Image: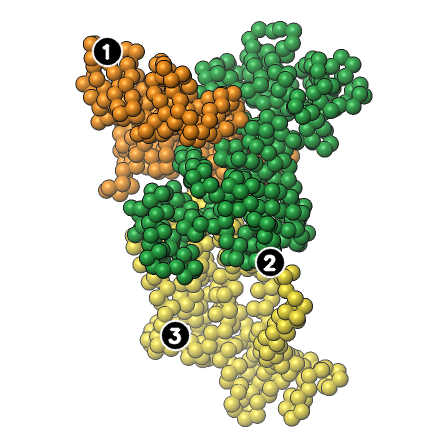
Amino acid sequence: MNNNLSLLQRLGFWLVLSLVFIISMFPLFWILTSSFKTRADVISTTPTYIPFVQYQPTLDNYKSIFISPIGDAAQSTASQNISVFRNKLLNSVIITALSTLLAVLIGTLTAYAISRYNIIAKDDLMFFILSTRMLPPIVVLIPIFVLFSNLGLKNSYLGLSLLYISMNLPFVVWIMKGFFDEIPVEYEEAAMIDGYSRLQAIYKIVIPEALPAMAATAVFSMIISWNEFVFANFLNRDAASTVPPFLNSIIGVGAVEWSRLAAASVIFVLPIVIFTFLVRNHLLRGVTFGAVRR
Amino acid sequence: MATVQLRNIEKQFAPDAIAVKDLDLDIADGEFLVLLGPSGCGKTTTLRMIAGLETQTQGDIHIGNRLVNGLPAGERDIAFVFQFYALYPHLSVKDNVSFPLRAQNISKSEVDSRVQDVAKRLRIEHLLKKKPNRLPGGEQQRVALARAMIRQPQVFLMDEPLTNLDAELRADMRAELKHLQHELGTTMVYVTHDQIEAMSMSHRIAVMNEGVLQQVDTPLNIYNKPQTLFVATFIGSPPMNIIECALVTEDSNSYLKSDNLNYKLPNTIDSTSQQVYFGIRAEDLSVASDSTADIKGDVILREPLGDETLYRIDIGSQILNIKTSPKVRLTIGDTIGLNINATNIHLFDKESERSLLH
Amino acid sequence: MASLSVKELSKNFGKLQALNNLNLEVEDGEFFVVLGPTAAGKTTTLKCLTGLLTPDEGEVHMDDEAVQALSPAERDVALVFQTYALYPRKTVFENMAFPLKARQMSPEDIKTRVTEIAAKLQISPYLDRKPAQLSGGQQQRVALGRAMVRDPRIFFMDEPLTNLDFKLRAEMRAELKRQQQELGKTFFYVTNDQVEAMSMADRIMVLNQGVVQQIDVPETIYDDPANLFVARFVGNPRMNTLDCTIDTTNNTISGEGWRLVLPELVEHFAINSDNKQSYIMGIRAEDIRIHRQAQDTFFAAEIFVTEPLGDKTIVDISLGDVNLKVREEAGFDLAVGSQVWLELDASKIHLFDKTTHKSIRKANS
């Protein structure tokens, strides 16, 4: 198809593509540059874009957010909150890792069972699983808040992880079930005839096959857990609180330290980018998996 | 090596979905038995019950002298080759072939030497390091066979293993597989819907239709002495010509009569049947001069195949297939006579569709 | 009705050469079959001729009218697809009426036309059904009917019988051929099945890797293949081929384990007069006889396996490292490993050049 396009058509094609690219990438670019600017540069009324020419980039923001508090914490009890960002980041990592791992593990096994076994009312079950995602989270916020208060799950790693697992599970189950349906059942049957148990067959044959899809679902689960704001903001206010509510809390009290906020945001985005990059090959196979099978 | 015995086997998937009905089958030690039938006839279900991948609703299955009802597939000492091979894509050919051995406690050197043995026999030595999904169909087929052979099982079970190959390769693999089974001497149960595979490879064919066993016999008996109308029309290419007619006895001779046919049978048939199906294969009709012909018709189509030529002859009520040597040249539109080869005729009762002759 | 003429047609997909300098002439009312393996360029040819693809080079004429610049609709041709491509939400009647509606035909005329064609194809009882409610053979008929209602110049068909089972395919083969004979229309039919090609075609064009191998009537394609590819692609079982050496001093052809004397060697084959040359010898399964006793002109071989087919038996024979397929009478049976002697029909052998793979048999020999 491409070689049938005229030069003009090609030019137009690239022009539109570039425009979309610039519009969508500009906020990211702005955050990145802001994180390397001094406070003065960042609030300057003439915007600057080019480092070394228009402004002198600095790493001070990155250094300082790990050493000294940001935002209103700086004004109040400075000594306690000295490494507050570091702590929040660690909390986010622990909760996200825990919830992603468990959601993918439990979801994969559930999906396998639904795909392979004759379960009564299978379709209804699948719909029920999905239906838990149909309510906006805010609707269940208060019941969950009460529940967590009574069970003592507030302000804990476990509480928020459990919540994120339940949020991610439907998604994992649906994606993985479709994926398992595409893997011919003969693989396991062959292994079982060869003298392996079903669990061994899953472990040795099905899981290696399913890795791309597991990687894809893991990335999506991770993004959801990592970015989740509403529940994190209400349930984990003191201990085990995560980065998104924290970043939000910086804004709105006194003068906003835009450059340090930008640096914190960049660091917050970084793990997702790195993880996605690492599993990108799997991700592509996981997403395009299907028709090319047999 | 072992016999396989099926007794009163029945398989029901749902109250109104009976896949296999009251099946009795004895497969001898070292026999190549083919289960043949159209799709949905119960042949694959039968094979999977022998393998232990399905459980029969009732009846007994013996492998060797062991009752295997309820025994998991892995403990039946059988090998199964699937239609699409089921090679594990993330493992190399070598790991695929040795995979069944890794379930057992077998030393690495023993595994290696056995892999070498089967690889040599199936001519896949040069492929051992490759990944299976990069290989062409024929080679994947060989790898699947190697994986089945390496355990030296009691019985080979094969589910349409040649279906995904192209015609030329299929013809080659047919001969190779038959030769291999002869050399190994292992009992083989082979499922196919392709009558050519069934005829060419098997010692005996079990023809199934709608869950019911129709006939178990040698290929030539299945071809020459079909016991039911179904077997007669399912086997053979082009399919057997079937003419509906009346069976009439006059002066102690039997005649077949219809609008276009008045044929005296070579032997008198003592039967209560009055309406019958008369069957005659395309190669048992020969072109004859008008005066001596048993049937007359118009040539309407010529299909040269190279080594033989098919003609379609319109006899008024229906169209017959005939098969001739390529030297016979008939002209489309001509009226010709046909002679019936009396030694190879078939008669089936119209009600029961069972043979009146064999 | 229309004739079709193609001159120097070429089509590349990036670096892949799908069609290379294709020339062909199809006569008015001819059943013309393009035969070749997967990726031979068959479907590309079809698409270039129907206008679905634009060729890189070459001319296409229908009835002496140049059609390269015309859209598929303007070419006034019909195309029957392998998957039938029936519209699932429309009934059989609506499917067949669809091409007529595009031509602004009145509802009464449409009804008359569809009913007439449906009767011809024996699908009248199904006109109210949806395609999914029909069997494969019936769907095939509807697809053909949808092509026929328009009365196009040329019918193009892309492996239309591939999705049918073995029995139905044999039946539909005959039916298509009869429809074509009755309509008297030009059929341009693409297939990878040599049985379909042989049995239906007036002429066959064998195509491989975008290059025409041979265009001729079925009998000539079978009896006198132009090259090794055609020889091995057409015929079931396929032609046996063996490496051989020719010695013109004593008129012998020999290979590993066998030797033939052929007095008219030089008359029948275009051979240089050098003494010894390597060729590939081809012989069909029906041109070999198996004997149980030795004779001077026979050579020893071993039974690899016998395959009874009912009306005949295919015998696989090991001759040194190669396997030959031999066609024998029904009922022929010998144990695996039995020693036998083979007799080749010397008048039926083919010789192919070792590098060009072209047949060196002289015409009329």
**Residue labelled with disc 1:** B253
Q: Is residue C15 above or below residue C186?
A: below
Q: Residues within 10 Å of mark 3 (few under 14, many from 20)?
A: some
**Residue labelled with disc 2:** C69
Q: Where residue A158 appears, x then y in whole percent?
A: 43, 68
Spatial separation of the CA atoms under disc 1 and disc 2: 73 Å
Q: For residue B266, which quarter of the picture?
A: top left
Q: Residue at x 42, y 56 (%)?
A: C99
Q: Residue farthest to the left?
A: B272
Q: Residue at x 36, y 43 (%)?
A: C120
Q: Residue farthest to the right?
A: C274
Spatial separation of the CA atoms under disc 3 and disc 2: 60 Å
In this picture, residue A170 sits left or right of residue C218: left
Q: Residue at x 66, y 88 (%)?
A: A47
The chain holding disc 1 is B
Q: Colour of chain A?
A: yellow
Q: Which chain is green?
A: C
Q: Is residue A111 above or below residue B239?
A: below
Q: Colour of chain B?
A: orange
**Residue labelled with disc 3:** A137
Residue B20 visible in rendering: yes
Q: Residues within 10 Å of mark 2 (few under 14, many from 20)?
A: few
